[in-house]
Amino acid sequence: MGLPVVLMPGPMHPAVAAGLVGHCELIRLWEESDPDAVLASRRDEIVAVATGGSLIDGAFLDRLPAVRIVASFGVGYDRIDAAAAAERGVVVTNTPGVLDDEVADTALGLLLMTVRELPQAERYLRAGKWQEDGAYPLTKATMHGRRMGILGLGRIGQAIADRVAPFGISIAYHNRRRKDVGYRYYPSLLDMARDVDTLMIVIPGGDSTRHLVNAEVLAALGPDGIVINVARGSVVDEQALVDALRDGTILAAGLDVFEHEPKVHPDLLTLPNAVLLPHVGSATIPTRNAMANLVVENLTNWFAYNAPLTPVPESTPLTT
Ligand code: NDP
């Protein structure tokens, strides 16, 4: 029997292809001159897909009836219709856990940058204004005494909570389900927003969470309100956020993710109270290597034992 055939629809971290050498035949679809012809001619052979952000929906899977696993790079899999995959008997895997600390570090950095206006202060120094105009203005906000509401107390949310607790920041959270933790739980996001001044967003993207953070939630945070988003841009109504930052409904925002990234809302680029990062939450060489290795291990464990390591919840009933 030949090696299993794996489809890579778009470019991925190079360690994925390197780790799969000897385990499978890899089709790099984006390098093919006629991708549709390749999909048609190999449709009964391609048993696995390795993806780093390509759209994988039911229609795509219907073109590849032999596929049994979609191994995705990253913990968020909002570009994959996992329910459609489950209906077709296809397991979806992601790369949870190995990036929690990295993303939490980014979130904490973004929080500090936003609260203490550190990027703005650095730009002030580089522009020569320290010498010309004197000290950078005192920041309105401080880390101390802040009240944080975590929208999505999962793996990364917990790692963020662990990091902010030593600052003396109080922690509450909103999930769909209460967890067995010591933080205050809010069944309603709006109620939590009314009681906190710092909203840390770390829930999955996708249709079920689209624009959960809207004008009403931002207004509830109030004029000292700070929004940090390290989740997905789709979770926040970006136009409502722009309006809230511009008219002082909230104080500031720190964003690692955007609704139409890599395009960023033009008004965000000019607002002085927005700190913007180009989706670098997990973007270090060691962490991205660990994520790539987990993609490889999911596939090789599936090839060898039909048991991928980290199936997403929608796929779990199929594998247990
Ligand atoms: P987890 O699945 O561990 O945690 C997600 C949490 O969100 C759970 O506690 C879940 O609780 C809660 N949640 C899910 N849906 C809803 C909802 N509709 N309303 C309220 N709460 C909800 O995920 P991770 O912590 O591993 O990752 C979180 C997200 O972070 C990823 O999905 C990804 O999009 C993003 N991310 C961003 C990165 C970046 O580079 N900026 C890097 C890595 C991840 P419950 O089920 O009880 O609702």
Image (cartoon, rainbow, N blue to C red):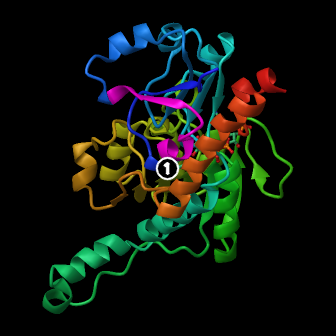
Q: Is residue 188 visible?
A: no
Q: Is residue 46 left or right of residue 253?
A: right
Q: Residues within 10 Å of mark 1 (few under 14, many from 20)?
A: some
Image x and y of residue 120, in percent: 29, 71
How many numbered discs sit on the rendered protein? 1
Image x and y of residue 112, in percent: 48, 71
Q: Is residue 27 magenta?
A: yes
Quarter of the figure with the C terminus: top right
Quarter of the figure with the N terminus: top right
Image x and y of residue 161, in percent: 68, 62
Residue type at mark 1: give it: Ala
Residue at figure coordinates x 34%, y 10% from the top left: 37
Image x and y of residue 198, in percent: 55, 58
Residue at figure coordinates x 56%, y 53% from the top left: 199
Image quarter where ligand 1 lies:
top right
Q: Which residues are magenta?
A: 15-30
Mark 1 falls on what kind of element? Answer: helix
Q: Is residue 295 left or right of residue 172?
A: left
Q: Is mark 1 within 8 Å of ligand 1?
A: no
Q: Is residue 23 visible?
A: yes
- Residue named by callout 1: 15
| 12 versus 62 height, above or below | below
Along the line of sight, the residue nearer the viewer: 117 or 256: 256
Q: Is residue 43 magenta?
A: no
Residue at figure coordinates x 55%, y 46% from the top left: 19
Residue at figure coordinates x 64%, y 76% from the top left: 167
Q: Is residue 261 left or right of residue 227?
A: left
Along the line of sight, the residue nearer the viewer: 60 or 22: 22
